[in-house]
């Protein structure tokens, strides 16, 4: 998606050779007009009529998923972090290890909001090693629901997440794929 790539080039800030900060339009301040274009693009790519729910993970995924959901006319369910704490039994849980942050988080979704009849589109802001998406798929499998696709705003193609999910047969569509960060400059794949 050219608009998104240009935004990353114009406003993104690289940190070392493997992180790009996009706080000014995606992760802190949010460019809502851009999110609308992102939502329309996800709708264009995932035109399956089967999708009846969008799943994401707090925090940054929520805004993106909600705006995209307007173009699908479906509800959004987001996995909550910290589901290891006193949340009762009515919840599907999965552990997610973050390489970026070096911590494991337990994510959870209430059994009230996901079930075997659901056909789910997963949406998230970043894909690095794909652990967050694997955690969501784990929960979807526990619920007996179906993964229809995975929509990612920015994939770091030099990390393993996208390829590992594609090799498992999932349809992963990323609107911008970063091939590398060379001398502080983002190079798209
Ligand atoms: P993974 O799920 O693909 O394995 O990624 P990883 O654990 O490495 O990423 C942990 C967090 O860092 C995620 O946010 C992810 O979106 C974010 N992240 C990873 N690489 C980058 C990057 O290059 N730039 C930016 N801006 N973010 C990156 P999170 O913990 O879920 O945070 P949030 O959604 O609450 O903001």
Image: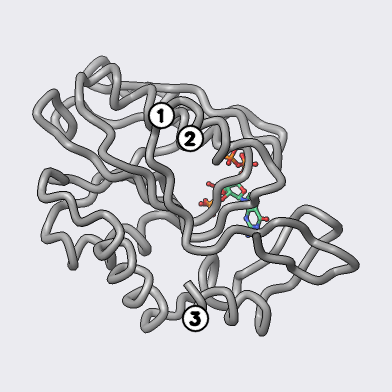
Task: Respond yes or no on whether mark 3 lies under 8 Å from ligand 1.
Answer: no
Tell me, for residue 169, which label it has, or none.
1
Q: Residue furthest right?
A: 183
Task: Respond yes or no on whether mark 2 lies under 8 Å from ligand 1.
Answer: no
Q: What colour scheme was applied to this rendering of the protein?
A: one colour
Give the structural element (helix, strand or loop) at label 2: helix
Percent of width and height locating residue 120: 23, 39
Q: In whole angstroms, how far apart are the C-alphas of marks 1 and 2?
A: 5 Å
Percent of width and height locating residue 95: 50, 23
Residue at image mark 2: 166
x 51%, y 75%: residue: 4
Give the structural element (helix, strand or loop) at label 1: loop
x 14%, y 26%: residue: 115
Tell me, for residue 3, which label it has, or none.
3
Q: In whole angstroms, how far apart are the C-alphas of marks 2 and 3?
A: 25 Å
Viewer-side residue, 92 vs 186: 186
């Amino acid at each position: 998606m050219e608009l998104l790539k240009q935004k990353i080039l114009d406003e993104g800030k690289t940190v070392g050779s493997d992180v790009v900060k996009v706080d000014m339009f995606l992760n802190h301040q949010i460019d809502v007009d851009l999110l609308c274009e992102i939502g329309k693009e996800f709708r264009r790519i995932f035109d399956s009529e089967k999708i009846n729910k969008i799943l994401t993970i707090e925090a940054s995924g929520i805004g993106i998923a909600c705006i995209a959901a307007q173009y699908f006319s479906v509800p959004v369910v987001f996995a909550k972090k910290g589901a290891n704490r006193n949340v009762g039994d009515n919840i599907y849980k999965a552990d997610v290890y973050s390489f970026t942050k070096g911590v494991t988080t337990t994510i959870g979704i209430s059994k009230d909001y996901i079930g075997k009849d659901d056909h789910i589109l997963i949406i998230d802001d970043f894909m690095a090693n794909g652990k967050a998406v694997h955690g969501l798929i784990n929960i979807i499998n526990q619920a007996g629901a179906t993964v229809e696709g995975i929509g990612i705003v920015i994939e770091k193609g030099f990390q393993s997440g996208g390829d590992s999910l594609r090799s498992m047969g999932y349809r992963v569509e990323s609107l911008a794929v970063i091939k590398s960060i060379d001398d502080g400059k983002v190079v798209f794949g």
